[in-house]
Image (spheres, grey):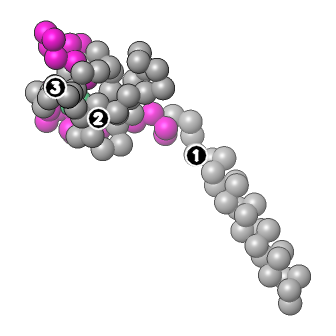
């Protein structure tokens, strides 16, 4: 009986590994189009206003990498040089 449970566990782990391998890499990059439209997001600054200086910005790996925005759930393609109507100066 114990052997059967270990085999079942192994099979379950293998199945999980296969399922993870099937997730396409492109799924990791996403845009929240609804919020982008609602907030009039654009990939360029609005004068001094840009995502890199906004309270809501979640930086990427480096200062020039795309990141996220706390107001755009699931969006990983927010440019540090972008802007929208919800810009609020970072303290
Ligand atoms: S609220 Fe607007 S300006 Fe601020 S980080 Fe998000 S998208 Fe950029």
- The residue under the point 16% across, 25% down is 89
- Marks 1 and 2: in contact by CB < 8 Å? no
Please tell me whether the stretch drawn in magenta is mainly helix, strand or loop: loop
Circle 1 SS class:
loop
CA gap between label 1 and label 3 equals 37 Å
Residue 68 appears in the figure = yes
Residue 43 appears in the figure = no
- Label 2 vs label 3, nearer the camera: 3
Q: Would you say 9 lies left or right of 39 here?
A: right
**What percent of the width, then of the height, locates residue 90?**
21, 27
Examine the image and state in which quarter residue 81 appears: top left
**Range of magenta residues:** 27-51
- Marks 3 and 1: in contact by CB < 8 Å? no
Determine the residue located farthest toward the front in the rendered image: 91
CA gap between label 2 and label 3 equals 14 Å
Where residue 69 is drawn, which disc sits there? 2
Which mark is first along the chain, 3 or 2? Answer: 2
Which mark is first along the chain, 3 or 1? Answer: 1
**What percent of the width, then of the height, locates residue 6?**
82, 76
Q: For the image shown, how many numbered marks are present on the structure? A: 3
| Quadrant into which the C terminus falls | top left
- Label 1 vs label 3, nearer the camera: 3
């Amino acid at each position: 009986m114990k052997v059967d449970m270990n085999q079942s566990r192994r099979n379950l782990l293998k199945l999980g590994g296969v399922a993870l391998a099937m997730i396409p890499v492109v799924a990791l990059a996403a845009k929240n189009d609804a919020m982008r439209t609602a907030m009039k997001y654009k990939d360029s600054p609005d004068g001094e206003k840009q995502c890199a200086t906004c309270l809501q910005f979640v930086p990427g790996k480096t200062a020039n990498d795309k990141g996220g925005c706390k107001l755009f759930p699931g969006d990983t393609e927010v440019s540090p040089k972008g802007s929208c109507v919800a810009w609020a100066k970072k303290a």
